[in-house]
Amino acid sequence: MDMIDTPRKLTEHAAAAQAADAVMTSKILVSMGTCGIAAGTTPVLEAICDELKARDLAGSVEIIETGCMGLCHSEPSIEVRRADGTFGIFGNVTAKQAVAVVDALDGGDKGLESLPRTWYYPEDEENIEGVIQARIALRNTGRINPENLDQYIANGGYAALAKAVTEMTSADIISVVTKSGLRGRGGGGFPTGMKWGFAAREEASEKYVICNADEGDPGAFMDRAVLEGDPHSVLEAMALAGYAIGADQGVIYIRAEYPLAIKRLDIAIDQAHGQGLLGKNLFGSDFHFDIELKYGAGAFVCGEETALIHSIEGMRGEPTFKPPFPAVQGLWKKPTTVNNVETLANIPAIVRKGAEWFRSLGTKKSTGTKVFALAGKISKVGLVEVPMGTTLRDVIFGVGGGILDGKRFKAVQTGGPSGGCIKEDALDAPIDYDNLVSLGSMMGSGGMIVMDEDDCMVNIARFFLEFTLDESCGKCTPCRVGNKRMFEMLTDITQGRGTPETLRKLKSLGGIIKDTALCGLGQTSPNPVLSTMAQFPEEYAAHVNEKKCPAGVCASLISFEVTDNCVGCTLCARNCPVNCISGERKKMHVIDDAACIRCGVCYDTCKFHAIIKK
């Protein structure tokens, strides 16, 4: 087709793409995100293609290699869309089940694990009664081939950009985004429209738009899924931001550990250039916009916008004092907006559908939806997108299926290492920016790590603090030295050397670091410690006063003992790595506590529950 240089040509291109799509009435969607590929989707895809060829159906059934469907708990996952409009979603599919997948085109699901669709698409005014999830940022992820520009255009892609540059002023764009109430989805929740307005008001010869794709929270994979499954939505949003603030250059700062996302972004940028959707005179206007990729080395601190900017400029990824803020003096000392992937993924839909449509979901102060990466001790690990205001209980026990192996829920960590732990009595709290802060946590980028009764909250706090300690740039003393001292105190507590004075110092130092650290990483680093101390004081007291770890996790505070249930099978002795278990066959065994290294192998291998933790 000709280059898309007018809105009319975009409309014609979309109609042609939709017509071509309608020809193939039967479709098989295969989840080919990183999680799917790692789970073995590639041989499943090959087997399905072979089966279609064997039945002479290859020309009448379309295979769509999508990004992540969000069903990480059941990868490889497959969706079958039938000619009559019905569909089936199947999980944990193997290559041997290719025959059953092709049979499912006729309505069967014999031998396949059927999965419910737990989401709807408010953008398409498609609602499923009783369904919790609503997909806006993930509207195309798992639904289209991310390497096929036509499929993105057929689903409304680049219509917002065409509308903006031909019908709207930059002030109009900022007004729509501001009225939508969209807040930054990467951490602090700053209003996106306000941030764009600051940059737009600056007079400068050059301005920049940066996409922060440096997703570094442990357990977080929302941005990676969007980039792998719908890269054009981010490119379109960056161009819209460029038009709004008067910038003609965008930069996507992405960690090099995301090779599939980088590959698909490169393809998308080339495709957009080839069709005139990036470059000079977009849609026949005088607006020019281009995008380049910059790779990060995985430094968590580079998620902070000033550190990220310094990294792009070739300097050390260290934050600087603000003001001036990037909107005034950012990349190369020019006005710059920095938004994360999920924030940008919402923009095209907001411009197309309007501010009120977006505000119809969520709460008054936290509008729209939020994507969460469910991880940890939960039955259904994966991506979820729910309206703001949905309760933690609905997410964890509704969409997430509850706790693994019937264990008792203990806590959920939101906001990654910058957030805090929330316990059971707050499960019915609505999820929004203000509520999470009031509970001692934060929204963050959307990581949600679920913990059960077997987790030690002191050890959890130590884990997150160790992460931020490793990731600190070391520029400011509170973060560099203060977090080191906090980590040492937590280590003392978990190894039985803690005292009541240790707890007092730990709490006091945490507050000082929050008040004096240079950037957001340092200011929020004590949060996991302070929140667990507030929510689980009895666990800290047990570690300090009784020298016991109630969860049986801290090795220095537990011991193992053989009970009368022992039948003398010798399994524990044969598996002990330090040979500290003795006893004759068919007679009760004994553990040498002085030689025991507390590895727990005996406890895990005993089939008669004859070994207990003390």
Image: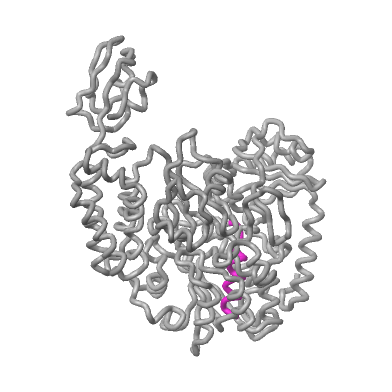
Q: Residue at x 24, y 61 (%)?
A: 482
Quadrant of the rendered structure where residue 301 is?
bottom left
- The stretch in magenta equals 229-243
Q: Is residue 75 left or right of residue 518?
A: right
Residue 257: x %, y % from top left: 45, 56
* Quadrant (top left/top right/bottom left/bottom right) for the N terminus: bottom right
Depth check: 60 or 483 in front? 483
Outermost residue on the top side: it is 586
Q: Residue at x 28, y 69 (%)?
A: 516
Q: Is residue 50 above or below residue 126?
A: above
Q: Is residue 434 left or right of residue 114?
A: left
* Quadrant (top left/top right/bottom left/bottom right) for the C terminus: top left
Let me know if residue 192 is in the magenta part: no
Quadrant of the rendered structure where residue 316 is?
bottom left
Residue 262: x %, y % from top left: 52, 61
Q: Is residue 54 above or below residue 564?
A: below
Number of numbered markers: 0
